[in-house]
Image (cartoon, rainbow, N blue to C red):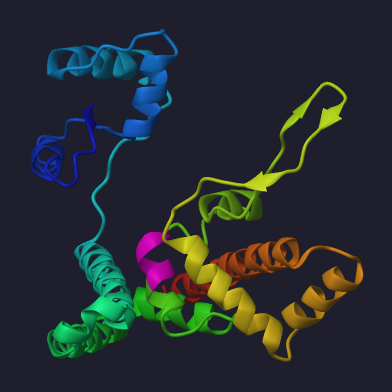
Amino acid sequence: MCEATGGHEDKLLGVLIELAIAAHRADPAKVKAYIASFGKRAKNDPIDAHWLSRYGCDRAAVLPRWQPAAPTQQKLELLVARRLDLVAMRVQEQNRLKAPRSRLIADNISAHLCELQRHIEALNTEIDTLISESRDLTLRATSLRSVPGIGPVLVPLLLAVMPELGTLNRRQVASLAGVAPHPKDSGKASWHRSTTGGRRQIRPALFIAALAACRGNSPLATAYQALLKAAKPKRVALTAIMRKIITIANARVRDALRQQNEIMIALE
């Protein structure tokens, strides 16, 4: 049992796998909630180690065992994460360039923007090459591109951040993407349901995908207009389209993987 520490735990987990020792990489938020459930507030390294050990003992039967991702998947995750970082830097620099006080350093900011753009384009090329060289990633990418609204930026993001696509049911995939409406009911009171949680990188990209799908000529655009005619707020209607996009993507990847498995079995 170890806690996720920004990658510092990878070496330990790798050694444990080599020694055939079962391990679990704990979610810090879940461990923190577990400690809080006992009313404890004190925090230091010895205290954290004690509670992490107790968490592992109490939940050992239900905690998933850690398994390393395939090398290609690991590299894709790193490349996509790096691209997200550079895009965020580009947005920051673009905002600085628009600021009135930045006129004196506009040339420096513009040069940095050009450099960032060059690195982003190089990453895009490397990501595309990595996907094209992997039969599994190519199959998944082709399935994702067939979904309205999913473009060349969202495809590698989904492949990197949601490798579980194709193995989940529609409720699980919606929750993982952060677009599942969670009830907040108590007795006879029923409050407005909100979409929370999920992997934070997915929702912004799905929002852009939903906007693109709603402007096109597809069943998703028809569904969006039907929701508006039913007096649903635009925000609610767009969230529903986001949920449809990710569930359709999950189903198409699942069907493609199933078909590939059937072909492989037939060839054997």
Is residue 74 covered in magenta?
no
252 lies left or right of 229: left
Q: Position of residue 16 (x, y in %)?
A: 13, 35
- Position of 70 relative to 268 (above/below): above
Q: Position of residue 224 (x, y in %)?
A: 78, 74
Is residue 158 covered in magenta?
yes
Nearest the camera: 46 or 156?
Answer: 46
Confirm whether residue 258 shows in the render.
no
Confirm whether residue 211 shows in the render.
yes
- Position of 152 relative to 174 (above/below): below
Identify the residue at image location x=75%, y=82%.
221
The rendered magenta stretch, by its main secondary structure, is classed as helix
Nearest the camera: 267 or 257?
Answer: 257
Magenta residue span: 157-163
Identify the residue at image location x=51%, y=83%.
145
- Position of 109 relative to 74 (above/below): below
State which quarter of the image contains the C terminus.
Answer: bottom left
Task: Give the quarter of the image for residue 102.
Answer: bottom left
Identify the residue at image location x=43%, y=26%.
62
Q: Position of residue 259 (x, y in %)?
A: 54, 74
